[in-house]
Amino acid sequence: MKKLNIAMIGYQFMGKAHSNAWRQVGRFFDTPFEPVMKVIVGRHEEKVKEAADRFGWQEHATSWEQTIARADIDVIDICTPGDSHQEIAIAAAEAKKVVFCEKPLANTLSEAEQMLDAVKKNGVIHMICHNYRRAPAVTLAKQLIDEGQLGELYHYRGTYLQDWIVNPEFPRVWRLEKSKAGSGALGDIGSHSIDLARYLVGEITEAAGLLKTFITERPLPDGSGQKGTVDVDDAALSMLKFDNGAIGTVEGTRFATGRKNYNRFEINGSRGSVVFDLERMNELELYIEEGPNSGFRTVLATDAAHPYVSGWWPPGHIIGYEHTFTHTVLDLLRAVSEQKVPTPNFEDGVRTQKVLEAIEKASESKKWEAV
Ligand code: SOE
């Protein structure tokens, strides 16, 4: 089988999730290439070496520039904070590599647009990692919607709730710095809800928004005892209008006490509804209007006929968060073999970024903003 050499930049949470996906994909699915976990890149030699050994990369390196320049590397997988996405992705596109990038695509719309220009100009394959599209129950919801089973779509109700920074003593980590993360809950988790809204319902044309930072100073993570400013949102609320006439709400917050990673959506159409909750991710709640005795039922999306499931276990043997990344890299490998740009790609990343920007703008103007 032909080999595809992967270089991954970044080795923290997403680096761990992507490493697992690259390692597992060929063991469970028939892939058109054998992905080779060639080199993992990070700034700190000791830490990146440890990550290489633990996650199973052949080599480690401290320079992404030198790694991108290597002729034997085919795919650049970007798992760094948002402030470096643009530079790395553009360099990778110019070196004619396949570019796979974590969300949100960039810290600003202008950076995201430059990334899209670069991948288009250089004719390379590109993908953004919105892994939740590939939870089998979510892909199933998409199939049902595309088949018209829910009828005309009226509502999208997306909530992404976490509580990991409720404690005021939680340090001012990079995700709480605008210069590194671009925004707070809005870009980090709201972007997932918006991507799912665009995937399942359609393009968003207008947004209203409300951003709020509850705790504006936190201890610096260096242990100095000094405090640093939090200049990103802790919570982001929005109302949305879709081009097909549907309306929606999205709420992303890191202050929903007791909610750990509650990524849920409900979609209501003229003939039925679907509900997904990541914390019960093998299930899809489905309502199809069939007269007085119809009601919500729970579909356990673990049959071989359900999306991606045939690669894993017999029915009822549930899968988890990490599998969504494996499905994502599977589709990337397939796209590379067909020389097609998969979805979601940098175009999707730019569209989502436009919605994020409109929400941010609307929060300041207190008016609806066009996307
Ligand atoms: C942290 O809030 C985080 O890890 C996000 O960055 C991920 O995209 C999300 O899937 C889970 O939460």
Image (spheres, rainbow, N blue to C red):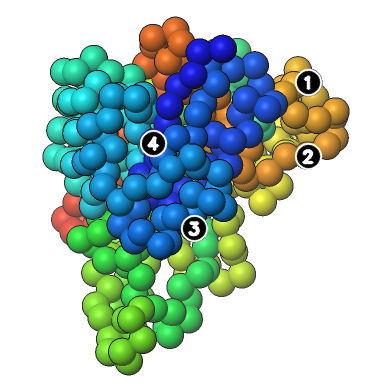
Q: Secondary structure at mark 1?
A: loop
In the rendered view of the protein, which quadrant contains the N terminus? top right
Give the amino acid type for the residue marked by disc 3 in the picture.
Glu
Q: Quadrant of residue 216?
A: bottom left
Q: Secondary structure at mark 2?
A: loop
Report the mark closest to the observer, 1 or 4.
4
Could you tell me how far apart the alpha carbons at marks 1 and 4 are, in whole angstroms?
32 Å
Q: Is 237 placed above or below 40 here?
A: below
Label 2–label 1 contact, CB within 8 A:
no
Q: Is residue 69 visible?
A: yes
Q: Is residue 146 visible?
A: no
Residue at which label 4 appears: 7
Give the mark nearest the N terminus, 4 or 2. 4
Residue 50: numbered disc: 3
Q: Quadrant of residue 94?
A: top left
Could you tell me how far apart the alpha carbons at marks 1 and 3 are, in whole angstroms?
37 Å
Q: Residues within 10 Å of mark 3 (few under 14, many from 20)?
A: few
Q: Residues within 10 Å of mark 2 (few under 14, many from 20)?
A: some
Residue at which label 1 appears: 304
Give the mark nearest the N terminus, 2 or 3. 3
Could you tell me how far apart the alpha carbons at marks 2 and 1 are, in whole angstroms?
12 Å
Percent from the top left, x then y, of residue 22?
54, 34
Give the amino acid type for the residue marked by disc 1 in the picture.
Ala
Q: Residues within 10 Å of mark 1 (few under 14, many from 20)?
A: some
Q: Secondary structure at mark 4?
A: strand
Label 2–label 3 contact, CB within 8 A:
no
Which residue is most to the front? 59
Q: Residues within 10 Å of mark 4 (few under 14, many from 20)?
A: many
Residue 228: numbered disc: none
Q: Residue at x 27, y 66 (%)?
A: 177
Could you tell me how far apart the alpha carbons at marks 4 and 2 are, in whole angstroms?
30 Å
Q: Residue at x 46, y 11 (%)?
A: 337
